[in-house]
Image: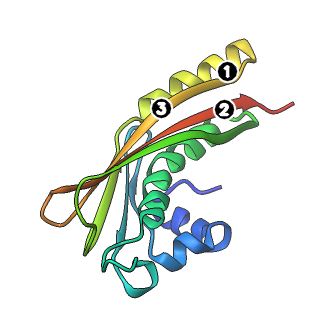
Amino acid sequence: MASSASKFNMFTFFKLPSAWWCGVRVKYIDDKKAVTSVTHRWINQNPFKSMFWAVQGMAAELSTGAMVINQIKDSGRKISMLVLNNTANFSKKATGKITFTCEDGHLIEEAIKKTIETGEGQTFWMQSVGMNKDGVVVSTFTFEWTIKLKK
């Protein structure tokens, strides 16, 4: 499975092709932080000349999920992951390049440790904030991830 930004971008081409074709790319990833970006283009626009909300959601989810994938891989255990819930707030029209940043990687480590120790599934919320090139927040997404040991 992917572990670096370039490997995640190859992963999206094969496993998340709609995100890849819309221009979603991982720019940076470590255990605590991930950054993705997507640029407003014809293929990902809405009728209002801005980026379709679902494309923003793909970029935001990848900034959280990429860290979950990496930390599960690092645990050496077979653990399933799934988005249980999500919320979004749109505060400005998304045009140009939008960068999504999640700095909640520390939550994953705790949840993986608990699910391995107890054998019970765990849930945790992660936030990703999308900003335009001027540093203005255009959207904020939160995702409730659930993980559990595979049997």
Q: Residues within 10 Å of mark 3 (few under 14, many from 20)?
A: some
Amino acid on which disc 2 is placed: Ile
The answer to whether 151 is drawn above or below residue 58 in the figure is: above
Amino acid on which disc 3 is placed: Trp
Is 15 on the left or on the right of 142, as rendered? right
Is 122 on the left or on the right of 41, as rendered? right
Decide: marks 3, 1 in contact (CB < 8 A)?
no
As drawn, the label of residue 115 is: 1
Viewer-nearest of labels 3 and 1?
3
As drawn, the label of residue 32 is: none
Residue annotated with mark 3: 125
Mark closer to the chain start, 3 or 1: 1
The answer to whether 130 is drawn above or below residue 7 in the figure is: above
The answer to whether 49 is drawn above or below residue 6 in the figure is: below
Q: Report how far apart the C-alphas of labels 3 and 1 lie in the structure.
A: 15 Å
The answer to whether 67 is drawn above or below residue 26 in the figure is: above
For the view shown, which residue lies furthest in the right direction? 151
Question: Could you say where residue 131 lies in the image, as x and y percent from the top left?
Answer: 24, 58
Q: Residue at x 69, y 14 (%)?
A: 117
